Amino acid sequence: MHDLIPLTIAVILLISVGAQWLAWWLGLPAILPLLAVGIIVGPVTGWLNPDHLFGDLLFPMVSLGVAVILFEGALTLRFKEIRGRVRVVRNLVSFGALINWLLIALATRLCMDLPWSLALLFGALVTVTGPTVVAPLLRSVRPQHEIASILRWEGILIDPIGALLAVLVFEFTISEQAQIQNTLLLFGTTVVAGALLGLAGAWLLTNLICRQLLPEYLHRIASLALVLGVFAFSNTLAEESGLLAVTVMGMRLANTRNLNIEDILNFKETLTLLLISILFIVLAARLDPHAFAGMGWGALGVMLTILFVARPAAVWLAAIGSKLTWQQKVALAWIAPRGIVAAAVSALFALQLERLGYADARTLAALTFLVILVTVILQSLTAKAVVKKLRLAAPPPRGVLVMGATRVGYAIAKALYEREIPVILADPVWQSLRSARMAGIPVYHGNVLSEHADTYLDLNGIGKLLAMSLWMERNTLAGLYFRPLFGADQIYTLRLDEERDSINRNRVIASYRTARLFGEQVTFARLQDRLDQGHAIRATPLTANFDFAAFSNKWGEQAIPLFALDPKGVLRVFSTRETLQPGAGWTLISLLPPTEAKNSGTA
């Protein structure tokens, strides 16, 4: 048996990666194939029994995994982002969450006959709409920008807030085991210990980083070690206070001035992705089919309350005083899939409650997983139709994602921005984005292929990718990644000089290739040289008297045509994919010599 343990763990890892790949390939939220795989290898086939496989290590393993997940979520909660968001978002993540919690708890108590403590805990768990589920759904549905922005930011901000609420309710539930006069004392001790240790951990890590007491290559591993240390030490001082401690620690770090946590956040995102994949399979494998069967009609009552009472009530109250139409309110009320935090935290709490002798602990986990499955599947299948019926679908995207904030990338982004084309300039180096930020051009600081970008990069209204970074591999990967979202015909890559290898040593294989931006002969170096010589990007209106042929005759090879705007304002790209022949009424955007550029508007 012991010989099979390493093999079983290795297979779980392989299956988890396979499930994530399947989700990417099918365009589904990762939670669905992960849950499906877990149920198949667990209750259905009996191949995986986590309790037998991990024994006494199951609870500590899940606890540490959830601690890292909650810490990573808390790292994204910046208070200024709540203040800066529209009133509806602030309301949804504050008293909207409170209304959701209380209505769901009441329905659970009445329909499922669970104790008040477990009903309140369940209500807290399912207030969370996870960004890992919402973000892919929004990319598929493409609602109006205002709706997409509200849903996206609600998912990001409610994640740590909902988790913190669930942790506090759980601490109070655990405290109820003591005599009634000690309940509030135990609860208060737990909250104070968790909060103080979380703040202490954040202070220590901040000082280690800001005073350069740690080399940069140790930032990631030191932060992980400190998070796990704070979690374990907090639980030792006050039982079950560790989750609160790591949540407070993450929130404090996220809101510390002059502290760059992007490197730590990127590392935690990668680690969280792995932990989530493993935990979902392991926790789904523990689900008891009898717990589902024993729910009866009460579970239906809870589901109907969540879908048609609690969420709509929270949205309508949160929207008081806003300019949202009733159609927008309906869309917001319908699109609220539950996600990873709810599943992971509920399973952990169920494990702890089982150990403490709560008879309905498994029902809590099963009911939470049922809510996740129903909301994700139902809303994934119907959200697009609902948005279309309400006439809230976004118009065809006109915008451009420019990848690579080099001088060339900045010049291109600035030219498009000045022509009122929606544009985002993305680069992982903060200083490279300085000029764009000063010019008011929307920017994204980070790798567009990262988990962070998957959550935070708002692509609403964006329909084209111009891959212009200095790394051929990154351009190729970006083309592959955004192909399902934008379509293969909307992906363009600027040629680098090393790709002009006569024996194709650096040439990307045909199946991975995209259209060459601005033509086969235009390279990054050529554009850079022209800009160094004083050339500038200029917009030229074409008329019947001065058409594209006249423009070409006048400038010849001195000009490099880049884009063209048709009479309807649709952006067309000069590339190897198609030969453009702009006519009268079009506007030509091209790179022109300095003399001509000085005589007119330039970019």
Image: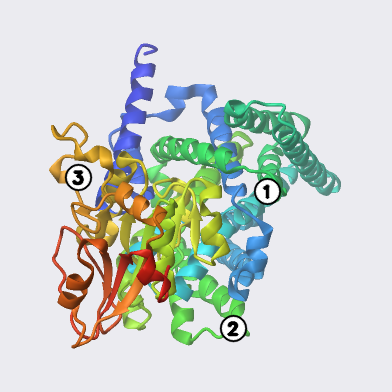
Task: Please indicate, yes or no, whether residue 552 appears anywhere in the rendered image.
Answer: yes
Secondary element type, mark 3: helix
N-terminal of the pair, mark 2 or mark 1, is: 1
Task: Name the residue nearer the viewer: 99 or 383.
Answer: 383
Q: Secondary structure at mark 1?
A: helix
Q: Quadrant of the N terminus?
A: top left
- The x and y percentages for residue 30 are 36, 48
In the rendered image, which residue does mark 3 sit on? 512
Which residue lies at the image location 19% right of the left edge and 87% below the top edge?
545
| Quadrant of the rendering where the C terminus is positioned | bottom left
Residues at discs 2 and 3 in contact (Cβ within 8 Å): no
Residue 251, disc = 1
Residue sitting farthest toward the front: 595
The amino acid type found where label 1 is placed reads Met
Residue type at tag 2 = Ser
Q: Earlier in the sequence, mark 3 or mark 1?
A: 1
SS under mark 2: loop
Q: Which mark is residue 322?
A: 2
Of residue 433 and residue 393, the one placed in the foreground of this image is: 433
Q: Nearer the viewer, residue 266 or 522?
A: 522
Q: How far apart are the two marked residues, 3 and 1, measured between alpha carbons?
A: 41 Å
